[in-house]
Image (cartoon, grey):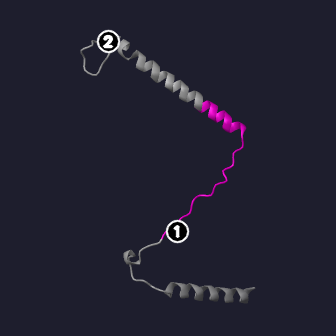
């Protein structure tokens, strides 16, 4: 196996370990702290039964009729649906 040549301080993008040791230590410490917090939070969640009693917010949203595409049909769909429902109810009476 070929040995890699030592890193010189003049190569672009590369630094000696001594130059980044403190940054590496701080990063490792932060990672361990984050992991410990996650383990602690998971243990708390396992011990306690939490119920969220908040309902999602609801907002009434109006629309601009001038921006609606298509030809407006004021009551046509509603009348057809009402007629269909009344016919269906009459048919159910015959078969009941």
> With 29 as the anchor, is 36 left or right in this view?
right
SS for tag 2?
loop
Magenta stretch bounds = 38-61
Residue at 59% of width from left, 58% of height from top? 56
Nearer the N terminus, badge 1 or badge 2? 2
SS for tag 1?
loop
Q: Quadrant of the N terminus?
A: top left
Look at the picture and state if 43 lies above or below 72. Answer: above
Residue at 59% of width from left, 89% of height from top? 83
Distance between the alpha carbons at the discs numbered 1 and 2: 67 Å
Tell me where residue 35 appears, x and y as whole percent. 56, 28
Question: For mark 1, does the 10 Å Cα neighbourhood hold few (<14), some (14 to 19), or many (20 or more) residues?
Answer: few
Residue at 72% of width from left, 43% of height from top? 49
Tell me where residue 60 appears, x and y as whole percent. 52, 68
Mark linked to residue 4: 2
Query: Does the magenta segment cover residue 39?
Result: yes
* Residue, disc 1: 60
> With 68 as the anchor, is 10 left or right in this view?
left
Query: Does the magenta segment cover residue 82?
Result: no
Q: Quadrant of the C terminus?
A: bottom right
């Amino acid at each position: 196996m070929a040995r890699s040549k030592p890193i010189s301080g003049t190569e672009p993008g590369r630094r000696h370990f001594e130059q980044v040791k403190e940054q590496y230590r701080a990063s490792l410490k932060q990672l361990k702290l984050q992991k410990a917090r996650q383990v602690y939070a998971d243990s708390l969640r396992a011990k306690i039964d939490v119920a969220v009693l908040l309902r999602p917010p609801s907002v009434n949203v109006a629309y601009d009729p001038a921006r609606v595409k298509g030809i407006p049909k004021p009551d046509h769909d509603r009348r057809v649906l009402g007629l269909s429902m009344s016919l269906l109810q009459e048919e159910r009476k015959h078969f009941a």
